[in-house]
Image: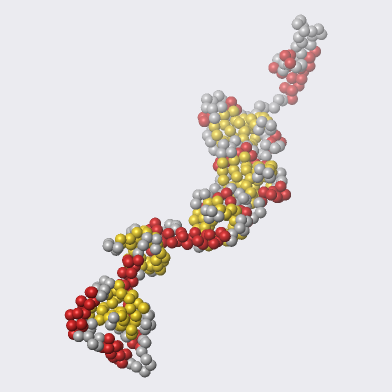
């Protein structure tokens, strides 16, 4: 295909090259051998055609392997056809670099590519924006080819934000800004980041110009930080979604809510047109759940929720998105003294709770965990009659006795004096934690939530004869009551009360 470029229809490649030779011969007609050989080099030196000189000329003809350039003043040059990506048009102006003189043919050897490189160094200045192709990578950054000039892009200047793998840009054509160069040493340092930042400022200005507060926009999460997330609204235009505007509820870590690359619908909260900063809100897309909280939650309502987080004073339970309630530590157990919420629940647990109080103005809901189940101390006296034998399990041992679990949530105290009919020095002589034992209920105090227990055998019931004797003795004592009060105004009634209350059975003869 190249051999047919710019040739008249019907001519062969050989005929085209023959015509080119004819044009060269015509151009050199009238020149002496001295002009062609000895004088040609001198002329090129004197007339500004020395090697390394940049010259301009027009395409005279295009052949399969060379392009003939007319430099004026009967001076011709030739450029290898391979230096052109596409065939130049006859008459097209070209800038080339003189490489030397072909004394035999009387033509200057020219290079278009080297001319572009030389022109680059000639016109180089800090701040210039150039296009280049990323050709490789080294420890410090990227290597770039800018029209034949080898440049360097420091890693910190590759992009506006950190890139894990900068090698992904190899082979791409990018725009860079000259930051430093040395013509003599041919060192060139450029920045892609400066170009991206400037383009971002321009795009941001255009974007903000038409943006209004309260508008709904879409964006993609670019980076998640401890204080919020940066959302890309369009290439080069970011907005900040602060952690406080992510949810109507409490967000501990933004990373728990958002992930890079996640698409969001957001509300524009504030625009600073001077600095270009845009504040975004995610929770504002939805209505505030606390506005109608009193309609959906009322005291004594039972529901389920997920334990969101623990604090020293209680546990926060997520009832719905954006609505958390607090279970105070005092409302976690009917029977156990809870020192920390982790003794009862852990984060992520799904628990059943009862609403105790709702304060829509302060965005607070008080919850009860223990209220979701029956109080085991209700009707405890009916479930544990005095003198009834019950099975129990030793939970813990103290110096004065052992605490025994009678049922879930109900413990009783087995005093050391009630463990054995024989005197014992320590509880551990007879019991250890985990023992399954039989105990007798001595006393039940529902208000104080106390049950007294005993392992001793109950006393034998009195015989009818003992009961009759006791009644006879009591009657006899009653008949001996003095008619007059004793001196000092005191009365001592055998069957009375106060100081005179005595048990006749202890005196029966």
Residue furthest top as drawn: 487
**Residue 214, how many percent across, how many down?**
63, 56
Q: Is the C terminus in the top left, top right, bottom left or bottom right quadrant?
A: top right
Residue furthest bottom as drawn: 10
**Residue 461, how many percent across, how many down?**
69, 27
What residue is shown at x 55% (from left), y 50% (from top)? Answer: 243
Q: Nearer the viewer, residue 161 or 101?
A: 101
What residue is shown at x 64% (from left), y 55% (from top)? Answer: 286
Quadrant in which residue 103 is drawn = bottom left
Q: Nearer the viewer, residue 212 or 284?
A: 212
Q: Nearer the viewer, residue 88 or 231?
A: 88
Q: Nearer the viewer, residue 341 or 402?
A: 341
Task: From the viewer's perspective, tell me whether residue 466 is left or right of residue 429.
Answer: right
The image shows residue 350, relative to residue 469, as above or below, that is below
Number of dots carrying numbers = 0
The image shows residue 124, relative to residue 96, as above or below, that is above
Residue furthest right as drawn: 483
What residue is shown at x 47% (from left), y 62% (from top)? Answer: 199
Quadrant in which residue 373 is drawn = top right
């Amino acid at each position: 295909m190249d051999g047919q470029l710019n040739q008249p229809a019907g001519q062969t490649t050989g005929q085209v090259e023959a015509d080119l030779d004819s044009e060269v011969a015509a151009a050199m007609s009238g020149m002496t051998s001295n002009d062609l050989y000895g004088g040609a080099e001198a002329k090129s030196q004197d007339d500004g055609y020395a090697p390394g000189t940049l010259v301009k000329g027009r395409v005279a003809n295009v052949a399969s392997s060379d392009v003939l350039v007319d430099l004026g003043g009967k001076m011709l040059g030739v450029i290898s056809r391979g230096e052109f990506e596409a065939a130049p048009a006859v008459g097209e102006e070209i800038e080339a670099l003189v490489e030397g003189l072909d004394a035999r043919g009387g033509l200057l050897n020219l290079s278009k590519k080297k001319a572009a490189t030389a022109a680059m160094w000639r016109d180089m200045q800090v701040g210039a924006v150039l296009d280049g192709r990323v050709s490789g990578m080294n420890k410090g950054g990227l290597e770039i080819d800018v029209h034949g000039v080898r440049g360097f892009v420091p890693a910190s200047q590759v992009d506006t934000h950190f890139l894990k793998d900068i090698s992904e840009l190899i082979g791409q054509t990018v725009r860079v800004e000259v930051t430093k160069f040395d013509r003599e040493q041919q060192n060139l340092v450029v920045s892609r980041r400066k170009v991206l930042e400037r383009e971002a400022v321009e795009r941001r200005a255009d974007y903000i110009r038409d943006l209004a507060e309260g508008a709904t926009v879409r964006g993609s999460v670019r980076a998640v930080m401890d204080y919020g997330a940066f959302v890309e609204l369009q290439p080069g235009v970011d907005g900040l979604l602060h952690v406080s505007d992510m949810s109507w509820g409490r967000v501990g870590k933004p990373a728990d809510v958002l992930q890079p690359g996640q698409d969001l619908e957001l509300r524009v909260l504030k625009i600073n047109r001077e600095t270009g900063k845009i504040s975004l809100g995610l929770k504002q897309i939805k209505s505030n759940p606390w506005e109608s909280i009193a309609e959906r939650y009322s005291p004594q309502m039972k529901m389920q929720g997920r334990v969101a987080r623990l604090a020293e004073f209680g546990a926060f339970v997520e009832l719905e998105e954006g609505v958390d309630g607090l279970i105070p530590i005092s409302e976690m157990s009917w029977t156990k003294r809870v020192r920390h919420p982790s003794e009862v629940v852990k984060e992520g647990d799904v628990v059943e709770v009862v609403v105790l109080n709702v304060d829509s103005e302060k965005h607070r809901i008080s919850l009860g965990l223990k209220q979701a189940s029956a109080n085991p101390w209700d009707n405890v006296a009916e479930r544990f009659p005095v003198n009834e034998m019950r099975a129990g399990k030793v939970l813990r041992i103290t110096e004065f006795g052992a605490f025994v679990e009678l049922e879930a949530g109900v413990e009783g105290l087995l005093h050391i004096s009630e463990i054995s009919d024989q005197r014992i020095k320590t509880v551990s002589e007879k019991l250890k934690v985990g023992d399954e034992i039989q105990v007798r209920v001595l006393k039940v105090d529902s208000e104080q939530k106390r049950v007294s227990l005993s392992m001793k055998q109950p006393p034998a019931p009195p015989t009818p004869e003992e009961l009759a004797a006791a009644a006879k003795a009591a009657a006899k004592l009653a008949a001996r009551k003095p008619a007059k009060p004793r001196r000092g105004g005191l009365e001592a009634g055998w069957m009375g009360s106060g100081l005179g209350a005595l048990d006749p059975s202890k005196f029966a003869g």
